[in-house]
Image (cartoon, rainbow, N blue to C red):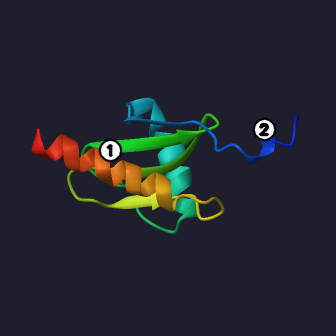
Amino acid sequence: MSALATHLAPTVVIRAARGSDGPALRRLAELDSREVPTGDVLIAEADDELVAALSVDTGEKVADPFRRTADVVDLLAYRARGLRTS
């Protein structure tokens, strides 16, 4: 891997949570010492791993405390606002 490749940010995918995401959401919530967000939930994946989730309905969020996720959580909040106003 080149030096440049090690400095690139991972691709982040934001999508609606599905039923099959339940176990990963529970693990993430446990890691963050929070409850699983309720209602319609958006999730963010980086490198095919769930790193953050946010409830469109309540704004509750969970994120991996061992990764830099502040920007990802901001993206989730931005997308949730768009969904609430449409």
Quick check: 79 above or below 61?
A: above
Residue under numbered circle 2: 5
The answer to which quarter of the image holds residue 31 is bottom right
- Residue occupying image coordinates x 35% and y 43%: 42
- Most extreme residue toward the front is 4
Residue 65 in picture, x, y percent from top left: 59, 65
Left or right of 6: which side holds 49? left
- Identify the mark nearer the N-term, 1 or 2: 2
User: What is the total number of numbered labels drawn onto the structure image?
Assistant: 2
Label 1 is placed on what type of residue?
Val
Q: Residue at x 54, y 54 (%)?
A: 28
Q: Find disc 1 in the rendering and name its residue.
A: 41
Front residue of 46 and 1: 1
> Foreground residue, 22 or 51?
51
Secondary structure found at label 1: strand
Q: Residue at x 42, y 42 (%)?
A: 43
Identify which amino acid the numbered label 2 is placed on: Ala
User: Disc 2 on helix, strand or loop?
Assistant: helix
Q: Which mark is residue 65?
A: none
Q: Quadrant of residue 1?
A: top right
75 lies left or right of 67:
left
Q: Residue at x 11, y 45 (%)?
A: 85
Percent x, y of residue 5:
78, 38
Q: Which quadrant of the rendered structure holds the C terminus? A: top left
Mark 1 neighbour density, 10 Å: few (under 14) some (14–19) many (20 or more): many
